[in-house]
Amino acid sequence: MAYATLAGGCFWCLVKPFNEFPGIIEVTSGYSGGHVENPTYEEVCTNQTGHVEAVQIEYNEDKTDFEAILDIYFKTFDPTDNKGQFFDRGESYEPVIFYHDKEQEQIAHNKINQLNEQNIFDKPVNTPVKPYKNFYPAEDYHQDYYLKNPAHYQGYQQGSGRKAFIEKYWGR
């Protein structure tokens, strides 16, 4: 088993695409990269803990790989905006790829270069690649939010502009 830790704005929006992907064992919403141990949602939202909302993906390396996970990841948010996502602004909503080893780091840089060479977006990909430091699971009510609160989740996707962005660039 292996792990990928990825941030792309609101963590609710990163769970569903991976839960539906073969080889994924578990997707956990949480907080990564900061300096406070076991932060709460309220603490992270103050932008004082250094954490971003992220998901940690446990996957079976015999069925999928980090590159395939990044293919999905880059279709879930705006990778050109490193100051937040859609109407969620600030440090806690910044996108980040947290690599767990040198191979993941290289794959992440290669994927970013590939996307930039393809000129898919109106601006260059501006998603930082940083070493994995920590991950703390979010509170239970944040886990699998799209299943627990489907109407609110869908309203958020639509109202934030995330859904329109994904449809514009990826047609889905």
Image (tube, helix red, strand yellow):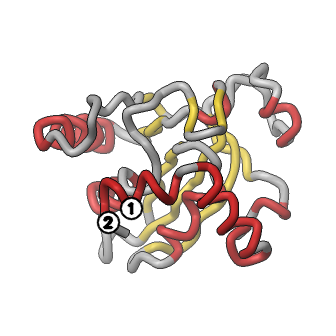
Q: Residues within 10 Å of mark 1 (few under 14, many from 20)?
A: few
The residue positioned 67% from the left and 56% from the top of the image is 29
The residue positioned 69% from the left and 49% from the top of the image is 30
Left or right placement of residue 55 versus residue 1 in this view? right
Q: Residues within 10 Å of mark 2 (few under 14, many from 20)?
A: few
Circle 1: element type = helix
Image quadrant assignment for residue 166: bottom left
Quadrant where the N terminus sits is bottom left
Q: Position of residue 128 (x, y in %)?
A: 41, 28
Left or right placement of residue 97 versus residue 8 in this view? left
Q: Position of residue 86 (x, y in %)?
A: 57, 40
Quadrant where the C terminus sits is bottom left
Q: Amino acid at mark 1?
A: Glu
User: Mark 2 to mark 1: distance in Å?
Assistant: 4 Å
Instruction: Tell me whether circle 2 and circle 1 mark residues in contact (CB < 8 Å).
Output: yes
Q: Position of residue 47 (x, y in %)?
A: 75, 23
Indicate whether 94 appears above or below 118.
Answer: above
Left or right placement of residue 74 versus residue 26 in this view? left
Circle 2: element type = loop
Q: Position of residue 134 (x, y in %)?
A: 63, 37
The residue positioned 27% from the left and 40% from the top of the image is 121
Indicate whether 99 appears above or below 141.
Answer: above
Left or right placement of residue 136 versus residue 170 in this view? right
Q: Amino acid at mark 2?
A: Gly
What label sits on residue 91 in the rendered view?
none
Between residues 84 and 21, which one lies in front from this camera angle? 84
Q: From the image, tell me which residue sits under label 1.
A: 167
Q: Which residue sits furthest left? A: 117
Marks counted in the figure total 2
The residue positioned 11% from the left and 37% from the top of the image is 117
Between residues 52 and 166, which one lies in front from this camera angle? 166
Q: From the image, tell me which residue sits under label 2.
A: 171
